[in-house]
Image (spheres, rainbow, N blue to C red):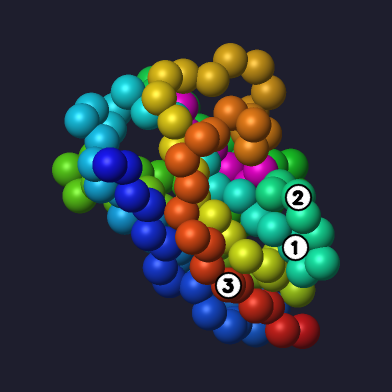
């Protein structure tokens, strides 16, 4: 059974940094899975794509996060990361990590429709 557990969230002032971690367990071959981070803003039902990493190791982030957020993974540790720098109040919300088997094709980062396995989410609050 695949399980994703996020950690590293919390409260930070604008301009600060946080690093989210997502412990991934139960994957037989982690390198064959695509991974992503998503944000659900307060009052919204939508999970917005933040960043993703494909099976070939290529990665991307959403336009509003480019240059500030970086996704990475450590297959040996079974952990996905999201380094968030120069945080803004509008970056706040619940962050989810997600995974699914195989590469995605098309837009980068892909929408939440491309992921079927999700963590429980973790709160990030950025104060001005």
Q: Mark 1 points at which residue?
A: 41
Marks 2/1 in contact by CB < 8 Å: the verdict is yes
Residue 38 picture location, percent across and down: 61, 50
Mark 2, Cα crowd under 10 Å, few <14 / some 14-19 / many 20+, is: few
Give the quadrant of the N terminus.
top left
Name the side, left or right, on which 24 lies relative to 106: left
Say which element carries label 1: loop
Say which element carries label 2: loop
Q: Name the residue under label 2.
A: 46
Q: Give the range drawn in magenta.
A: 49-54
Q: Residue furthest right?
A: 43
- Tell me, yes or no, whether the highlighted magenta stretch contains residue 52: yes
Q: Earlier in the sequence, mark 2 or mark 1?
A: 1
- Whether residue 42 is visible to the viewer of this picture, yes or no, is yes
Q: Mark 3 points at which residue?
A: 123
Q: Nearer the viewer, residue 101 or 71?
A: 101
Marks 3/2 in contact by CB < 8 Å: the verdict is no
Q: Which of marks 1 and 3 is nearer the N terminus?
A: 1
Q: Residue furthest top?
A: 105
Give the quadrant of the C terminus.
bottom right
Mark 3 and mark 2: span between their CA atoms? 15 Å
Q: Does 74 appear above or below 104?
A: below
């Amino acid at each position: 059974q695949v399980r994703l557990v996020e950690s590293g969230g919390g409260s930070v002032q604008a301009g600060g940094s946080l690093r989210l971690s997502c412990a991934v367990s139960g994957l037989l071959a982690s390198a064959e899975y695509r991974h992503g981070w998503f944000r659900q803003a307060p009052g919204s039902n939508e999970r917005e794509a933040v960043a993703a990493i494909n099976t070939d190791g290529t990665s991307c982030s959403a336009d509003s996060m480019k240059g500030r957020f970086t996704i990475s993974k450590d297959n040996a540790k079974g952990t996905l990361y999201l380094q968030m720098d120069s945080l803004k109040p509008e970056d706040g919300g619940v962050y989810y990590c997600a995974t699914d088997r195989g590469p995605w094709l098309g837009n980068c980062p892909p929408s939440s429709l491309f992921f079927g396995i999700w963590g429980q989410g973790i709160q990030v609050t950025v104060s001005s």
